[in-house]
Image (spheres, helix red, strand yellow):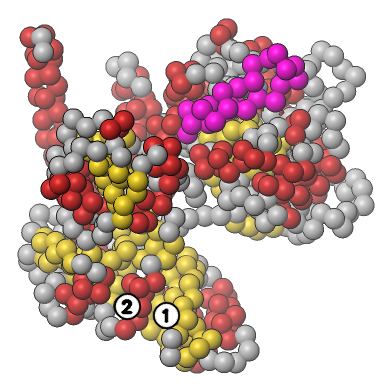
Amino acid sequence: MTPKLRSIRTEIDKIDEELVRLLAARVDAIRAIGACKKDDKDAAILDAPRERAVAEAWAKEAEARGVSSYFVGRVLREILNWSRRDQEAALGRAAEAAPKRLRIAFQGTSGSYSELTIRKLFQIRCPGEEVTRLGRHTFKDAMAALLEGDADYALLPVENTIAGTINEVYSLLAEHPVTVVDEEAWEVEHVLAGLPGASLEQIRTVRSQAVALQQCHRFLNDLGCVAEAAADTAAAAHELKAEGDPTVAALCSEEAARDLGLDVLKRGISDQQVNLTRFILIGHKPEPFDDRLPARTSILLSVNHRHGALARCMQELADRGCNLSKLESRPLPEAPWEYLFYMDIEGRADQGPLSEALEAMRPLTNRLQILGTYPRRVGVANDAVPVTTPRKAEEEMVHAAPPAAPVCKPNPNLKNVARKDETRTVVRVGPVEFGSSRFVLIAGPCAVESRQQIFDAASMVKDRGAAMLRGGAFKPRTSPYSFQGLGHEGVEIMQEAGRAYEIPIVTEVVRPEDVDEVAARADMLQVGARNMQNFGLLSKLGTVQRPVLLKRGMSATIEELLLAAEYIMAGGNRRVVLCERGIRTFETSTRNTLDVSAIPVLKDRTHLPIIADPSHAAGRKDLVIPLALAAAAAGADGVIVECHPRPEEALCDKEQALVGDDLDRLVQRLRPILESQQRHMNVEGPNESDDGGPCFNGF
Ligand code: PEP
Ligand code: MN
């Protein structure tokens, strides 16, 4: 190392030390505020205007210092999330807090995801307290440690976003007099770890827990190694370390690799983008927590044999507006064809509407057991959620263009797509909502051209307020000699950029056989105008767990667009967003003609969200903003526009590509229109999710 490099590194070390010192000072200040709030029962925990003001001040300061405001904003978001959780935890801690020197039982060895989650949860529940983590061989053994008094709590996983429910843990809860007192989520990110100095090419055997091996199936297949099952991910890492064979690698957490001094050979190797596990903390008795904190209650019940008993139970919840976030059934071994139901419901078992609902449910059940009420720390995964827009808001939303009278007879074939009442579907892509009072801006280049181009584009659109990144990896070009796109490699680049900049991505798919692979990486799949009637593709998209952006064909009627959406919905996929992108007319001064009237007509005919693509409609950069404004005024739920970090280098559609300043202008001019309709831009404020988990991908 050169002396110069050494001196810069010394400087960095000093800065890092200072950063940690400042973070610690900030945490102290936050705790002082938390203490004030604890005494003042009217004080809200989340002060959104204050958080927004802090974010704006940081962004301004960052810009003045020539640092990316996106990067700084991301750091701030982590700090605010932690601060909020720390305050909530302070409120949650009862005065007669748990005994000193806590002992927590879990299944696995040190470095396993359960153990990491204990570290995360207890730093929040009781910072500074000494916590002993007791690894046990099985879930049952961990529960036994709690029951026999060897542990104060047991932390066990109950569900994983890929593998599903862990039934054994539910059975243990049903069988023993214990209670759920808390919950926590861990984002599972497997890495491939090898001995120090080992290289990826050397690896012949990969070892891990069976589920983890499955979750990285595609990567392991490409690597062409033998997979060997181990008791858990951390145990695989321990074995590797003990054996010292450089041709063996372990799939484990980055933390386990680091603790054991192993090298990380590869990151980002899971087939699925998001892999979250929810854990529950089990104790002996309920623990009170502050009324201002969001709560969740877990119950189990079995219904008596009367017809419709379960439906009546659910009705009691629905009638009181109690939100059910999980329902799971388990067979009762002692009574064939009878089932136990596990439910997670938002609210408290001993207060308010949930307490009333539970009382009303009791006579309908053979057994109703409250497993616990605890602070809700883990967000609820959302799907297409129909919401009823109040009539007044609806009228205001489209006041610039009153709903048109039906233009043609209702088509009985639009079974899923037709609007039947005031209910509108909100399609969620992570934190992004299509069809609510938020207006979605999607921006990005026409095509994925290179890694650098997409990363620059992601940074640009994120900084300028877009909610999603677009970019075509498969380009259906009119001429076979035009650039056809980078294919799956391009999708991978989009995925990486989406992760790096925490922005959901949408990309086009043109062949049914590519759908599964693209769906594994993209947050939303686009059907382009040229494929609107590719029925094989539409049917395939009906079977995937990803929302679809369906563009209107350039010569398709509105009826044909709706029928194309019906193909997708008939297959079971209800998350469809329609897109008006201009149609072919006799006019030649624009590439196509944006059919603005299609927006209110579609709003009248379907409950699905509708966005507009002014870029492909205009084909000219100077018309993109005016057409986007027209679409917003007509009631569109968002726009998708093309932009490029360096339009002069664009490999396709360079004439219509906006630059960063154009995006700023677009957002600025959209604002008053949206305000007049009581709507707002999708990305306002630093952080709208309350769970501290990843904000998109796979939800
Ligand atoms: C695109 O969005 O990249 C595209 C090709 O648009 P369209 O299918 O509307 O022509
Ligand atoms: Mn294009």
Image quadrant of residue 78? top left
Is residue 492 shown in magenta?
yes
Amino acid on which the number 1 mark rests in the picture: Leu
Q: Position of residue 12 (x, y in %)?
A: 14, 21
Classify mark 2: residues with Cα within 10 Å, few (<14), some (14-19) or many (20+): some
Q: Position of residue 402 (x, y in %)?
A: 79, 43
Horizontally, is 438 left or right of 462 in the view?
right
User: Magenta segment range?
Assistant: 470-495
Name the residue tied to disc 1.
Answer: 300
Q: Earlier in the sequence, mark 1 or mark 2?
A: 2
Label 1, secondary structure: give it.
strand
Q: Position of residue 442 (x, y in %)?
A: 58, 31
Query: Do the residues bearing badges 1 and 2 touch, measured as CB atoms within 8 Å?
Result: yes
Amino acid on which the number 2 mark rests in the picture: Leu
CA distance for labels 1 and 2 = 9 Å
Image quadrant of residue 250? top left
Label 2, secondary structure: give it.
helix
Is residue 70 shown in magenta?
no
Q: Nearer the viewer, mark 1 or mark 2?
A: 2
Residue at image point 66% right, 46% down: 541
Classify mark 1: residues with Cα within 10 Å, few (<14), some (14-19) or many (20+): many
Q: Is residue 451 above or below residue 371?
A: above
Image quadrant of residue 298? bottom left
Mark 2 CB within 8 Å of ligand 1: no
Inspect this view and state whether residue 375 appears.
Answer: no
Residue at image point 58% right, 44% down: 516
Name the residue tied to disc 2.
Answer: 173
